[in-house]
Amino acid sequence: MFSLWLLLSGHYTGLLLSLGFVSALGVSMIASRMGVLDDEGLPMAVFVRLPKVALWLTWEILKSNWAVVKIIFNPASAQPQLTWVQGSQKTATGLVTYANFITLTPGTVSVDVEEADNYILVHALTDDFAQGLSDPEMDARVSQLEGTKP
């Protein structure tokens, strides 16, 4: 957060830099003492794997956008439905990331997450979108991002 503030503020005086550093250090020490710094809160290893997954997700979003555009021009082809999708993620963060990836791709929206059973309730705009949810690639990519094997 300190780096982001420094980048966005444009103020580089010695007093502000030292006070900002002391503040960031103090907040980190308090958070550590509270026990809120854990691997699930901010897993740093995710940042290494994120660019590869982000490029793939961007491509999936573009493909889904094109499919939604076709539905907009032919609204009779819409067949809204709810379907359950099972995730193979080992952590709550991984499951929520999977649900967010589903929501980011147009034509599908994650409605509910059942963390105990690793299920996500998804609203799909068409039958094709609902069937596309059974493709294990997104689940595998999120598991890879999480650092586990599906």
Image (cartoon, rainbow, N blue to C red):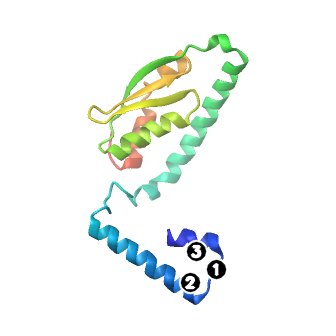
128 on left or right of 32: right
Name the amino acid type tagged 2.
Leu
Of residues 125 and 30, which is closer to you in this image? 30
Q: Which of disc 3 and disc 2 is earlier in sequence?
A: 3
Q: Which of disc 2 and disc 1 is earlier in sequence?
A: 1
Instruction: Please tell me which residue is depicted at 49% across the width and 20% down the height of the picture.
Output: 130
Pointers 1 and 2 in contact (C-beta within 8 Å)? yes
Q: Which of disc 1 and disc 3 is earlier in sequence?
A: 3
Instruction: Please tell me which residue is depicted at 49% across the width and 34% down the height of the picture.
Output: 102
Query: From the viewer's perspective, is residue 57 above or below residue 25?
Result: above
Residue 79: give x, y in percent of width and height.
Answer: 56, 13
Mark 3 sits on what residue?
A: 6
CA–CA distance in space, label 3 to label 1: 7 Å
Instruction: Please tell me which residue is depicted at 42% across the width and 20% down the height of the picture.
Output: 83
Locate residue 37: give its quadrant.
Answer: bottom left
Task: Pick out the residue farthest to the right.
Answer: 73
Query: From the viewer's perspective, is residue 106 above or below residue 141?
Result: above
- Crowding around mark 3 (Cα neighbors within 10 Å: few <14, some 14 to 19, many 20+) is some
88 on left or right of 126: left
- Look at the numbered disc 2 and give the secondary structure of its residue: helix
Please tell me the numbered disc located at residue 11. 1
- Look at the numbered disc 1 and give the secondary structure of its residue: loop
Residue 107: give x, y in percent of width and height.
Answer: 57, 26
Of residues 111 and 101, which is closer to you in this image? 111
Pointers 2 and 3 in contact (C-beta within 8 Å)? no
Name the amino acid type tagged 1.
His
Instruction: Please tell me which residue is depicted at 32% across the width and 58% down the height of the picture.
Output: 39
Mark 2 sits on what residue?
A: 16
